[in-house]
Amino acid sequence: MSKWYSIISAVGAVLLLVGAAIQITKLPWAPYVYLAGAVMFAYVQVICGYKGQNFIIRRLRNQQIIGAVLLVVSGVMMLLWKRNEWVVFLTIAAVLELYTAFRIPQEEKKEKE
């Protein structure tokens, strides 16, 4: 992953966190901050694909992309719906992202051995 993708991903993650935190206060611009971060984060995850042949890593990457899409969906739900339904999609996305963040490096380590 290039230096720029790392920067975009980190900025996106910070915007995600800030947007979700200030959404609790119901500030009108909070969904836009969150959605900008979600799009940046999802963009990097989709662009930085896996080209190898390991079936497990390909499956985990697909789960990671599903999590990224769910982050964007939760941002859209913040804009369209005025209650807290977006939290369900955010929770599912967070679980998928967290799981794959730990599993992919383990599988890559096994692959190198």
Image (cartoon, helix red, strand yellow):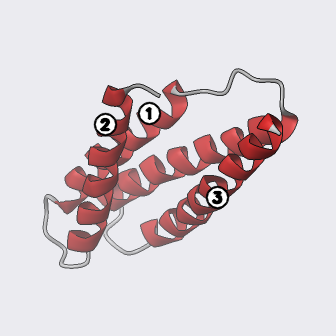
74 lies left or right of 93: left
Residue assigned mark 3: 102
Vertically, is 45 above or below 52? Answer: below
Q: Which label was assigned to residue 55?
A: none
Q: Residues within 10 Å of mark 2 (few under 14, many from 20)?
A: some
- Disc 3 on helix, strand or loop? helix
Image point 51% across, 36% down: which residue? 45
- Tell me which residue sits at (83%, 24%) in the image: 53
Residue 26 quadrant: bottom left
Comparing labels 3 and 2, the label whose residue is closer to the camera: 3
- Which quadrant of the structure image shows residue 4? top left
**As shown in the figure, which amino acid type bears the numbered disc 2?**
Ile
Q: Are marks 3 and 2 in contact (CB under 8 Å)?
A: no
**Classed neighbour count for the residue bearing mark 1: other residues with Cα under 10 Å, few (<14), some (14–19), many (≥20):** many
**Image coords of residue 79 (percent x, y):** 29, 56
Q: Secondary structure at mark 1?
A: helix
Q: Work out which residue is located at the far bottom of the displayed protein and give it.
A: 25
Tag 1 residue: 44
Image x and y of residue 104, in percent: 68, 47
Q: For mark 2, what is the residue?
A: 8
Residue type for callout 1: Val
- Answer whether labels 1 and 2 touch (C-beta < 8 Å): yes
Comes first in the chain, label 3 or label 2: 2
